[in-house]
Every structure is written in structure tokens, then in C-alpha cells.
Image (spheres, coloured by chain):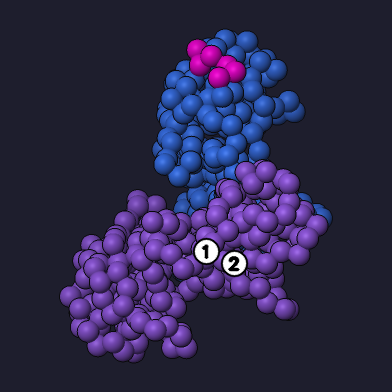
Chain colours: A purple, B blue
Amino acid sequence: MKRIKLTVAYDGTNYSGFQIQNNASTIEGELKKCLTALLQEEVELIGASRTDAGVHALGNVAVFDTDTRIPAEKISYALNVRLPEDIRIQHSCQVSSDWHPRYQNTIKTYEYRIYNRPFPNPVVRLYSHHVYWSLDDSKMAEAAKYLTGEHDFASFCSAGAQVQSTVRTIYEAAVQAEESGMITIRLKGNGFLYNMVRIIAGTLMEAGRGSLPPEQVQDILAACDRSKAGPTAPAKGLTLMGIQYL
Amino acid sequence: MKRIKLTVAYDGTNYSGFQIQNNASTIEGELKKCLTALLQEEVELIGASRTDAGVHALGNVAVFDTDTRIPAEKISYALNVRLPEDIRIQHSCQVSSDWHPRYQNTIKTYEYRIYNRPFPNPVVRLYSHHVYWSLDDSKMAEAAKYLTGEHDFASFCSAGAQVQSTVRTIYEAAVQAEESGMITIRLKGNGFLYNMVRIIAGTLMEAGRGSLPPEQVQDILAACDRSKAGPTAPAKGLTLMGIQYL
């Protein structure tokens, strides 16, 4: 028995999220179906990040145990032939049998993309959130800098999350504006609470539009109250860029 | 009667090109249907560029004549409400009644995008051509520079095109590589022959892969023979960025 680690990219548009469900199409469900067909054995997957419906990923991670004689590095190719074109394995390799994608120190990188132009752009519509009023990206960047460091992010966590602690560390919170109208929020941290990136994006957009003074992010953090932060930004703007295992 | 100019963006994935057809979904067909419903009159459209099936646009141009009392600038908003989400008007304005989108001096800008990584990336799959062998973008840029200026581009024109002259001027032919693996070929010119950008992209990819010395582009141009150039690159990598009227 060996444990295989997969790095998985997907377009989340047509899926009800990562985690397997009975009556809905999910990333895990597709992976499991194709793995079972490829390996001719029942496979249990453990995913690193259970991304929500509509969220994209370039580098989510999952592991499974197998007796297959297919070399670990070749599994990526063999799986990609079977997977739908909106899911593509980027890398496969063997890891030790106790290697777990969640119970480890990691740095996760997320990007939230906002297309900020008067009219929507059809070719980016599935991978960004369209905002037609003008956003001041320098104000967004200013608001973002208050997020870096170790904080209690309870204000940036949707109700219903079951976590022991809402303290997390953000290593980088950058806002980059391109000439095309795309504004990208990049967050690197040691962990993210439920909807945390989307609530941060919703809050930074309020700062960008002028309805929230950037320095107020400090008060929002201190309040530990979800109602003090901005709205949860739509899923389609969010992409899990990668997970770095330390 | 007034003439209205539309600047149109679309995701060409699900269309059989711009030009109206009887039994296929096209950009022009969708525009005409929505305009007729909006204005309650029969509308004839004249498009600037009849992009092929699968080709995208951020700034194609079309005009139509109408008696409507809707202000020209508001037509964009009214149309966008009716159009499918993969077509979006970017701008509408009135032009003089003899303003024609084709019979004028213009600079057209096209981009051809190549995703150059070992594995496909699902979130860019619809808007770029995936090449898994490594391309040398500096060789592509070197090959591209021979294209600038006035040349007979007969070697870069698919058979079946009915044009009087195959001489065109390219003002800019740039190749830009990003860290993400995306290579963008940007071409600005006073006109492009049938499939010209896609044949140029196919030829530059041969240069990037090392199977065509960059300076050989000069011989290809001189030959005026389609068979001397590279293959026609797939439609989905191509985007008409905009048309500048001089």
C-alpha cells in the first residue's frame, strides 16, 4: 500500500464544491470516479481544502492509498485522460503513509479577482466578480495591510463554522490593479476560516468604494463580530492558488 | 434615422463565429435578435470583423440604423439586460449615417494566448491554446520582429480568401511571457488576412519550439506560399482586442 499525493487544478463553475455529495457533481466525486476506474479498486480521498461551490483552484491537494503498480508520477497523466476538461491533475507523487494533507503546517495562497469596469467582460466573467462602480485600489491595499500578522479573525468567519480557535496568521495581503481593470487580492496565511477570504474581499471592496475608512479594519478585527465586516463576496472570484507544506 | 455604433465583447466558445447563419448560434444573430426585441423594428447589422467560430473579442465593432428614441449611450445598458452573459456591449454611441465599420483606415489589435506548461490549466482552457512542450519566448519574439512593417502576407493567409491584395502593414508584433506560463502574442496592424493571426501564432510556436530558425520568417514572407508557414493555431487562443479608427 502506498500513499499518493495529487495536486489538483479545477474550474469550479460547474461543481457543487470539492467535497463529495450524493446528488451533486463535485470535484472529489469526479476524482474518485476516475481513480476507481483507473486503478480498479475502491479509493478513499482525503482533500486538503473543501472549496465551496463555484470556487476555483490551481493547487488544491488530495491523497489516497493504493496498491497500484502504476508509477506515482504517471498517475497524473493517466487520470487527466479520464477527467473532464475542467479538472486537471498538475502533479502526482508518492508520500509517506502517514502524510496528511490537513494536519500539517502550511501556507495557503488565495486570490480573489474583481473586474472593475463599467461593463462586464465576457471572457473573465467565470473567474472574477464584476464591480461597475470605481474602486480605489490604493485604499483597498491600505485596508489589507491591517490584516497581516496574527489576529482573531472571528469577524471574518461565517456562522456555522466549527473551529476551536479563530486565530490565524496572514503573511501577505496584497492588492494589485492591472490596466485591464482586474484587481487581484492575494492572501497568504497559515489557515483560513470558513468564507474568510470572501468576507475579506467584500470588506476590501467597501474600502475601495469609499464607504469604509481603511483603518476601520482594525476595529472590525477587534470586534470579533461577523456583522461588523463587509458582505461575503461571490464564490466565482475566488481561486485557491496553492498550498505550501512546511 | 440615426446610425449607432456598438463596441462588442464576447466569449466565442459557444458560437459559430460572428456572422449570422441560419442554423447556428452566432454573435450577430444574438445581437440582431435582442436589438429587434428592444427597438421593435427590423435591424440590419454591419460588423467590422467576422471573427471565426471559437474566437473571442473584447472590442469588435458593429453599426445599425434605427428610428428609436432611446438615447444612443443607453442602448448598451438596455441591450446587455437582454443579451446572454457571454456577449456584452462595452459602449454605444451615435455616428454619422455614412460611418462604415469596415471601409476605413483602422488599427486592429489581436492577442493570441498560449498556455505553456506540462499540464493544462482548467481556468484558462477556454481562452488559450495549451502547449506542453517548452517554448522559448525569446525565439518567438525574435521571429515576430521580422513581421513588422509592410509585407505581402500571402504565406500567412488560408486558401479561399477573396482579397485583392495580400499586402498588409504590421505596426507591432510583441511576445510577452508571464510567470504563470502564459505567453501572449500581440499584433497590431492595418488589416489581417483570413486566419493570418492564427497562422502567425502557429509559425511563432514552431520558432519557440526550436524547429524553425527565427530568421526563416523572412523566407516564409518572401515565398508567398501558405505551405511554407506553420500550422493554423486553434481558434480559442485568439482574441480581437480592439479596433482603432484613424
Where is B149 relative to B26, above or below? above
Subunit that carries the residue with mark 1:
A
Considering the numbered disc 1 on the image, is that residue within a helix, a strand or a loop? Answer: loop
Q: Give the residue at mark 1.
A: A100
Q: Where is residue B159 shown, x and y percent of the image?
A: 73, 25
Q: Type of residue at label 1?
A: His
Q: Nearer the viewer, residue A186 or B165?
A: A186
Q: Give the residue at mark 2.
A: A46
Which residue sits at x=39%, y=84%?
A164
Which residue sits at x=42%, y=40%?
B178
Instruction: Give, as a single range, the part of the protein colored magenta.
Output: B210-215
Q: Earlier in the sequence, mark 1 or mark 2?
A: 2
Eye-nearest disc, 1 or 2: 1
Task: Check if mark 1's residue and mark 2's residue have beta carbons within 8 Å.
Answer: yes
Which residue sits at x=38%, y=60%?
A107
Q: Where is residue B18 shown, x and y percent of the image?
A: 66, 49
User: On the image, which quarter does residue A146 sit in?
Assistant: bottom left
